[in-house]
Amino acid sequence: MADVGLTHVALPVRDVEASIAFYGRFAAMRVVHRRADPESGHRVVWLGDGTRAFVVVLLEVEAVDVRLGGFAHLGVGCASRSEVDGLCALARREGRRCVGPTDSGPPVGYWAIIADPDGHNLEVSFGQEVGRTVGERGAG
């Protein structure tokens, strides 16, 4: 995989291990790199789902001042509506903020927003047609 195009999004987090667990459960991501910043000692972790050369970088901080909230979010495609429903049920059992699911029809699909441990929004969806739309329109 080449490092061309969009490669990562970085999120400030207070508890790296809690965020690793969250993104593992709700986005099927795993740690692909981890280190400690030599100056601050704060941990830096890269999470990937193995499907493309893209990672979510978790940057450990003392306090999270800026969050992906409102309309800002990370989006993850799911294999089915029932997977979206299951993730929402899991989020609610864990006491997480969960909005939806909502069926917005094509091309938006069936989606929900789940808050991670620091309040960043993760959208889980089925049927958004991103891959098909990009494939039809090509890279240009």
Image (cartoon, rainbow, N blue to C red):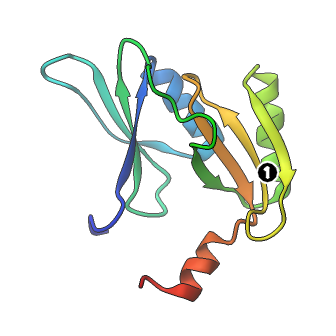
Quarter of the figure with residue 127:
bottom right
**Dot 1, crowdedness within 10 Å: few (<14), some or many (≥20)?**
some
Q: Which three-letter amino acid code belongs to the residue tagged 1?
A: Glu
- Residue shown at 61%/53% (left/top)? 76
- Residue drawn where x is 13% and y is 23% of the image: 38
Estimate the x, y position of residue 65 in percent, counting from the top left. Answer: 44, 20
The location of residue 56, given as percent across then percent down, is 42, 44
> Which residue sits furthest front?
70
- Given residues 56 and 32, the one toward you in this image is 56
The spot of residue 124 in percent (x, y) is: 69, 49
Which residue is farthest left? Answer: 39
Rendered residue at 84%/45% (across/down): 101
The local secondary structure at tag 1 comes to helix
User: In the rendered image, which quarter is residue 109 located in?
Assistant: bottom right
Q: Give residue 53's quadrant in the image.
A: bottom left
Residues 94 and 108: in front is 108
